[in-house]
């Protein structure tokens, strides 16, 4: 049945909604990554929750304003033609503020959209290698179908932290700014589709069924909802969401399933009101982004109208209409992304663009990185083929623009990922080819890592799954202490257990991955950094008794019979 709520009932539910946040014990809101403490915006300390969405005080205030907070507003609501879940109430609030009345469940607040679609991330150390692989697969899924880009965080102020909080599976909607924010992937949430859904909240999506016009498309069967969970079926006000011209999407990965928060698995809480192409649509899929999800994200982040994200190890692309010719005022972006630790070799195979001074008009630009401000590799026009372009890292940005001038045939290009090479930087990521998917047969990759003089190289594996053999004869990872294959052997590893952390004796480390022609596995993911022994300093890291060196940092410890004091450096007599 279609239930109705008056403003007073909604406010009671909002109190329950706010109280739901109090059930989480969140004394600790940080985790240790290489001994660095990250103090993030914790969804478990949210003001309230809507399902798996964490609401801050501003969100909660918006809901209370939308559903009425005084007698005058309740009186106005009572005179509405239809106040089922207060549809007119919400729209009336939006009208009074002259907000756009578009109806799709994406954030309408510019400050919650990630600048340039770039979302830096950190993965907490409490996840397994297979879980990390799922997170990366989910992020690559978003990258493949939209212009959103996930990057390993370096020094960005705002970023997301994959962690496991008591609230289970939960996230804020959009970018909160001012520091890190957690995306909690709790027990039984580490599934590809669920992580894609949670990342949808990070990108800026609310649940599809909360959009203001949802009563035209679905029925909410309130008698079947678990007591106290009614607030999860409230609707957003138009000023909080923006349709961007998109229709209601039953197939959205952000849509509730038909029995979400049901009193029984066999009872429906939300059902489509009409057939689509003669069939009642299914809802609540957690398999992939829908066409509507993709279109919405592309509009929200103002993606270029043509181009794509290229993630295969080898591929090709060309300007629109090639070789018949491109149109005026064309803008395309291709984002080439291969496995970290690989490089990209890009070759233009045909070039026929209007020639101008400095290629001011029609041109194709190649940038060495993941975005429009990455270092410029070259800007090309005319009919001269550029030399091969090799990326510094695992991403290239290719952008094509045309003007209203003379139009040529366009261009075509091919690219290929190559593994191995020299890595001259103080930190970075290395992964086996095609990670987190299975590596290919008969691959040999060699990396020569060099960090700053006076430091050592620290190598840590986050994920490891290589064909197992007693002597690691078939597929293996080999690490040597120096710059060549003749350097002293530090480790030769295979199987499914992560190798111990490795540290070189100089500022160079040699790493080799090899596979044969038979069994292929998921491979490995590792990180390296410049390392120094803080415990060798005269002050021993200001540790009173013992200093224990770790990769990238250190920790203090105490002798038997003592324990660390609150300052984590001093020692005191251990309690009995």
Image (cartoon, rainbow, N blue to C red):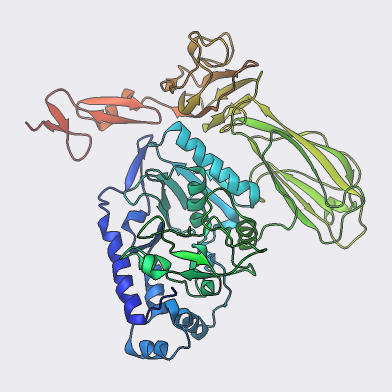
Query: Between 211 and 282, which is closer to the camera in this rendering?
Result: 282
Judged left or right of residue 363, residue 126 is: left
* Residue located 46% across and 43% down the image: 122
Q: Does the rendering let one see residue 57? A: no
Say if residue 342 shows up in the picture.
Answer: yes
Residue 475 drawn at (x, y percent):
57, 16
Q: Identify the residue shown where x is 47% and y is 37%.
A: 132
Location of residue 503 in the rendering, given as x and y in whole percent from the top left corner: 44, 20
Please tell me which residue is depicted at 59% across the width and 61% down the height of the picture: 281
Taking 287 as reference, is 89 left or right? left
**451 is higher (above) or lower (below) than 159:** above
Q: In which quarter of the image is residue 517?
A: top right
Position in image of residue 99 (x %, y %): 54, 79
Instruction: Find residue 12 and report its image quarter.
Output: bottom left
Q: In which quarter of the image is the C terminus?
A: top left
In front of the other: 102 or 542: 102
- In which quadrant will I find the N terminus? bottom left
Residue extending farthest left:
576
Q: Which of 81 and 466 is in front in this view?
A: 81
**Residue 373 falls left or right of residue 322:** left
Whether residue 511 is situated above or below residue 135 in the rendered picture: above
| 333 on left or right of 41 | right
Residue 326, given in percent of the width and then of the height, sits at 87, 55
Give the number of callouts. 0
């Amino acid at each position: 049945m279609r239930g109705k709520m008056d403003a007073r009932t909604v406010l009671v539910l909002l109190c329950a909604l706010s109280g739901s946040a109090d059930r989480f014990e969140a004394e600790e809101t940080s985790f240790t990554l290489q001994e660095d403490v990250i103090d993030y915006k914790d969804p478990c300390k949210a003001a309230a929750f809507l399902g798996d969405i964490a609401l801050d005080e501003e969100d909660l205030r918006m809901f209370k304003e939308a559903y009425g907070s005084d007698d005058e507003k309740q009186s106005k609501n009572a005179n509405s033609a239809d106040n089922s879940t207060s549809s007119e109430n919400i729209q009336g609030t939006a009208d009074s503020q002259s907000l756009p009345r578009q109806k799709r469940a994406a954030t309408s607040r510019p400050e919650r959209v990630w600048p340039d679609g770039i979302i830096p991330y950190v993965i907490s150390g409490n996840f397994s290698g297979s879980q990390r692989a799922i997170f990366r697969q989910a992020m690559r899924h978003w990258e493949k179908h939209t212009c959103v880009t996930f990057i390993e965080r370096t020094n960005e102020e705002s970023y997301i932290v994959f962690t496991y909080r008591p609230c289970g599976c939960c996230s804020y909607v959009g970018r909160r700014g001012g520091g890190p924010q957690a995306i909690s992937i709790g027990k039984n949430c580490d599934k590809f589709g669920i992580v894609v859904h949670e990342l949808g909240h990070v990108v800026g999506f609310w649940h599809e069924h909360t959009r203001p016009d949802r009563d035209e498309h679905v029925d909410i069967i309130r008698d079947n909802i678990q007591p106290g969970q009614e607030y999860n079926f409230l609707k957003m006000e138009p000023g909080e969401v923006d349709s961007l011209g998109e229709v209601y999407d039953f197939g959205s990965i952000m849509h509730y399933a038909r029995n979400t928060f049901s009193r029984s698995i066999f009872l429906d809480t939300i059902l489509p009101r009409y057939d689509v192409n003669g069939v009642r649509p299914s809802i609540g899929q957690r398999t992939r982004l829908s066409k509507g999800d993709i279109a919405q994200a592309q509009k929200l982040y103002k993606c270029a109208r043509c181009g794509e994200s290229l993630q295969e190890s080898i591929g090709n692309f060309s300007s629109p209409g090639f070789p018949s010719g491109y149109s005026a005022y064309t803008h395309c972006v291709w984002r080439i992304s291969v496995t970290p630790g690989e490089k990209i070799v890009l070759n233009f195979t045909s070039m026929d663009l209007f020639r101008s001074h400095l290629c001011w008009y029609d041109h194709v630009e190649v940038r060495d990185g993941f975005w429009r401000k990455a270092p410029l590799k070259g800007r090309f026009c005319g009919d001269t083929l550029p030399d091969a372009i090799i990326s510094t890292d695992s991403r290239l940005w290719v952008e094509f623009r045309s003007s209203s001038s003379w139009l040529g045939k366009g261009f075509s290009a091919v690219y290929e990922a190559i593994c191995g090479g020299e890595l001259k930087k103080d930190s970075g990521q290395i992964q086996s080819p095609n990670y987190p998917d299975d590596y290919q047969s008969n691959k040999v990759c060699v990396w020569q890592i060099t960090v700053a003089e006076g430091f050592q190289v620290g190598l840590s594996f986050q994920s490891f799954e290589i064909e197992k053999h007693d002597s690691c004869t078939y597929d293996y990872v080999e690490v040597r202490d120096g710059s060549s294959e003749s350097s002293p052997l530090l480790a030769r590893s295979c199987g499914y257990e992560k190798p111990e952390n490795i540290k070189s004796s100089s500022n160079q480390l040699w790493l080799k991955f090899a596979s044969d022609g038979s069994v292929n596995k998921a491979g490995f993911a590792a990180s390296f950094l410049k390392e120094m022994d803080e415990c060798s300093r005269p002050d021993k890291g200001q540790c009173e008794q013992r200093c224990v060196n770790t990769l990238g940092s250190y920790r203090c410890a105490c002798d038997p019979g003592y324990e660390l004091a609150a300052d984590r450096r001093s020692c005191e007599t251990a309690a009995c």
